[in-house]
Image (tube, rainbow, N blue to C red):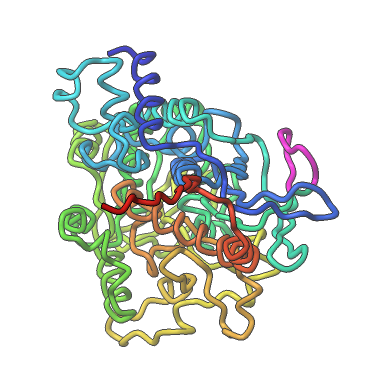
Amino acid sequence: MSLEALNERVKRDLSYLAYGGADWVYPTSHAEGHVYDTVIIGGGQCGLGAAFGLLRERISNILILDENVEGYEGPWVTYARMMTLRTPKHLTSIDLGVPSLTFRSWWEAQFGSKSWEDVDKIPRGDWMNYLRWYRKVLNLPVVNEVKLKLIEPAEENVYRLHIEGAGAPSNTLLARKVILATGIQGGGEWHVPPMISKSLPRHLYAHTSENIDFEALKGKKVAVLGGGASAFDNTYFALSEGVSSAHVFVRRTEMPRINPIRQMEGSGLIERFNVLSDADKYAVMAHFFKHNQPPTNETFERAASHPGFQLYLGAPWLDVQYEAEKAVVTTPQGKFTFDFLIIATGLVTNPSLRPELKLFERHIARWNDYYNAPDEIANHMLDAHPYLGPGFTFTCRDKKESKHLHGLFAFNYSALVSCGITASALSGMRYGIPRLVSAVADQLFSDNREEILKNFYSYNEAEFVGEWTERISEAR
């Protein structure tokens, strides 16, 4: 099957599902102009999947905004440096149960079914190409090069979105519902320890989430801080790009070996996470954070086989200093001097760090507002996550003020503690997207309840038009 034939198959499959029917949501009028029923912030896999889900529910007055240029949404061809995805290839995600929309269908249409059998893990670049195809074949309404600056209440149940960028059609847009499908960093910010950021000039270090000029690092001595998957992705990438040596420093005395996601994928824990108690949710995520995500065996072996690779276990950084245009790092194993530092220390999640939520942040409940964890598992990083409802809705610190957050949804990494990995891992999206879409649709329906019920009660269009002429039988 060719890609053109697959495109036709997608159209046929969707027609069998009556995809594209008339909207049921009543339009909202506003003096400032058009009001979208839903605006999705982020055109990566989460945003695209959410849009498809809404369209399947006959909610088409939607828009997706993404700050990147077209085709570069998400991390896959920007700052992600792994060779392949870490997710098993057979798991489905944003296809939402439509076989012709799966990555496998897209792959086999181009390379054949035999080629699929030969694939171990999905190559990173091919996943991005699949997302580009998915967006195109579904004709999803994405506007690129638009950045959300601020969400502001416009009136009851309507938000004013302040935007900027080359693709922005205006300075503001109006929306009834706003979905923050803003990825791993969308609930906070990437974290660089102050010991580094306050001691070194900016040109001597970079977080793994940033653009790194590896061409300028050729022949240089580089240090990598962190022991998770991203640290080793960047280590191998740096070595393959020509650094003379890459030294990985891990705080733990042993490499992380267990990937909790692999157990979750077949246990029911992903799809049924929402029925757990708060105590269970917190304990599960505390355990999840404790293990971290290890590098893939392939990435580690490629990096370790390079003569310039060096690994230090039990080697936290105790001090970082700037000396003679170099970074001097002190660890329990001694001092080391480097030309450049790559920081793989992940992110910090907290709604207070998000500029777009500045007007709402004080209302947003965190986990430590609702749950006090036992001392043995208490984690301030988990405590700062927003306490969300099962449909990724923000919860208000004061329930009497819930109207302030009505219509805002966090479908990003910040949902981890409340909703599990259903918005932060490919293996969870097939479960998370339907819940999100259902929650958005439920709110739209409830908001229009009076009008919907009024029209129901006043409906009097005759469906049966048959007539009966009485017959008089003759007496016998």
In the rendered image, the residue lying farthest to the front is 476
Could one spot residue 244 in this view of the protein? no
Residues 407 and 353: in front is 407
Q: Is residue 98 visible?
A: yes
Residue at 58 percent across and 51 percent down: it is: 461
Name, please, the residue furthest toward the right.
31
Q: Where does the image place residue 262, in percent across and percent down from the top left?
A: 19, 52
> 422 or 57: nearer the eye?
57
Q: Position of residue 327 (x, y in %)?
A: 49, 49
> Percent x, y for residue 217?
47, 31
Location of the N terminus by quadrant is top left
What is the magenta range?
Answer: 163-171
Residue 246 falls within the magenta-colored stretch: no
Which residue is depicted at the point 60% across and 45% down?
62
Residue under the point 50% across and 76% down: 366
Q: Is residue 340 left or right of residue 90?
A: right
- Within the image, what quadrant is residue 197 found in? bottom right
Q: Residue, x 33% and y 50% (percent of image)?
A: 474
